[in-house]
Amino acid sequence: MSDTPPVRPVLDEPPPFLGTWRRVYIVVLFYLASLITLFYLFTRAFSS
Amino acid sequence: MRPLDWVVLAGSLVGIVSYGLYRGRGSNTVNTYLLAGKTMPWYAMALSIMATQTSAITFLSTTSQSYVDGMRFVQFYFGLPIAMVILAATAVPIFHRTNVYTAYEYLEQRFDVKTRALVGGIFLIQRGLSVGFSLSAPALVLTLLLGWPPQATILILGGLVTLYTFFGGIKAVTWTDVQQMIVMVAGLFAALFTAIWLLPRNVSLLDAMSLAGAAGKLNAVDLKFDPNSQFNIWTGLLGGTFLMLAYFGTDQSQVQRYLTGKSIAQSRLSLLFNAMAKVPMQFLILFIGAMVFVFHVFQPPPLSFQPLEMKRIEQRAEFQPLSQTYTLALDQRREAASAYLESRRSGDGALKRRSLEQYREAQRQIDAARSSGRDLARKAGGAGDDDTNYIFLSFVTRYMPAGVVGLVMAAIFAAAMSACSAEINSLATVSVIDVYRRHIAKGGADRHYLWASRIATLFWGAYAMAFAHYAMNLGSLVVAVNRIGSLFYGPMLGVFALAFYFRRVRGTAAFIGVLAGEAVVFYTRYNTSLAFLWYNLIGCSVTVLTGLLLALLQSRDVHPGARFKS
């Protein structure tokens, strides 16, 4: 066998939404910030 | 377990294994056996990554964690989305374009054979030490709570996992992971709804959350910076990011999942799905534990959820007075909880303050009694271990209706199998690609390496079962050995960071960087009280800095007077 897996063309497609990967990454990080904020408010709301 | 539970459990296991064998057919080349011919869609990889990360003991202990310690453990996962974004942007395209079977194979392309051998060897040691625990830990819990013979549990779980991994390779592993993840999520939701449904009729979900919050069980975010605390937002965001980068970026059990993607975009999407889904899922798991806590506010829990320790405690003369104190505290907590809920409804501020203080005082007495119980167990010859791992399963087996118990048990089995199959599969891959093919039998036929991969799978499956049997007797060492993983991840991440981002660094500098990183991490482990999440950051930083420093010195030796650029 060859030392590497059979070579297939490496496809680097754009994401299926938002146009560019950079925008997708920003949305993911914004989502994380939103989750942490929500969890913080949740903690505050139920800490009596 | 009632007949319906056995039907659900057996049906789930047979369904998962049959489906794995069906989807794994046609794995008759090394490329299809180890990389699924790079044909996997993003959703299969995404669920496989999630399932692999969720072991049975994670399933059992995380659901119980918030009962004891609140929900702050969720912060441990805050670094995961950041790590996924970094890996999707950097590691995924590099691994795809270099067309490798293992992450360590890339290190030889980038550095040299000794760096590949060192890091591949670290992976084999680290994973080899942990592979048995994914079987032994659930077997131990199931033995103590249900009386199942541990050897039978290990043999059934290990045998099934080895069977479909042997025949179907990574295709079988990935598609069974998908099934297992679905069973796990179904089990979690069943547990959540049952826990809420079992609350007293006059206690609403909002009431339950108020009681959990008043006892400090809904503390999802802690902003205080304390480097010795394992779970606060800073440890999660900084230490957690490095841990997740190391785990998902350098551990072959994870890297191999997204190497099977049919394109870079599909692999990226699988990681980004995890970035979005993992934190809410952990929140849900911990929330179940908080609801189990509230359930036990109204339904008295045992002094210890660990049956063997409980028997030891009961044999001591000090048990009677301790039991009376504990029962009294439970009664006080229940009455104070009812008064607190009443004050919330009536808007009586004075009653609310008084009942809240009584509720918290009763909780402190309960915690102290449980701690005294552990001391008693130690005096009676027990380990006095934390009973956290037993809380959720104790709740499931004692209070859940027929059918749901079987579903939750199937979810626990699924979690154990998904973690174990990924470990066996990745250990076999590294053994064959990075050791056997590279150093022992070069230039063989594809069929030769296919059978070598199958034999390696059988070996690691048998090893996992044998090691699990041995690990059953290690007791509290289980925790210590599990922590060993955190000693290696930092330098592993550091060497990949050098490979990805610093072109001037060569093999010897990277090799020495890893050794220096390991030395500093081991020194930190045995000479400081720093939380283990920081080891990853320290190990990575030392490896990178050492590698850069040596590259700078090498650069000056080769080109005296030339300025170093990276």
Image: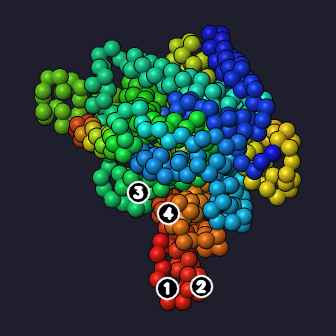
How far apart in space, not on screen, are marks 1 and 3 (Cα)?
A: 35 Å
Q: Are marks 4 and 2 on the same chain?
A: yes
Mark 3 on the same chain as mark 2: yes
Of mark 4 and mark 3, the one earlier in the sequence is 3
Q: Residue at x 68, y 61 (%)?
A: B108
**Which residue is labeled 3 in the image?**
B238
Q: Nearer the viewer, mark 4 or mark 2?
A: 2
Distance between mark 3 and mark 2 Cα atoms? 37 Å
- As measured in the structure, the alpha-carbon distance from the residue carrying label 4 to the one carrying label 2 is 21 Å
Can you tell which quarter of the image residue B256 is in? top right
- Please report, as a chain letter, where disc 1 is located: B
The residue where tag 4 is placed is B501
- Image vertical order of residue B148 relative to residue B71, above or below: above
Q: Which residue is mark 1?
A: B562
Callout 3 crowding tier (Cα within 10 Å): few <14, some 14–19, many ≥20: some
Task: Give the camera-side residue of B271 and B392.
Answer: B271
Q: In which quadrant is the N terminus of chain B drawn? A: top right
Give the distance between the C-alpha atoms of the residues marked 4 and 1, in whole angstroms.
Answer: 20 Å
Q: Earlier in the sequence, mark 4 or mark 2?
A: 4
Residue A23 locus on image (x, y percent): 33, 42
Circle count: 4
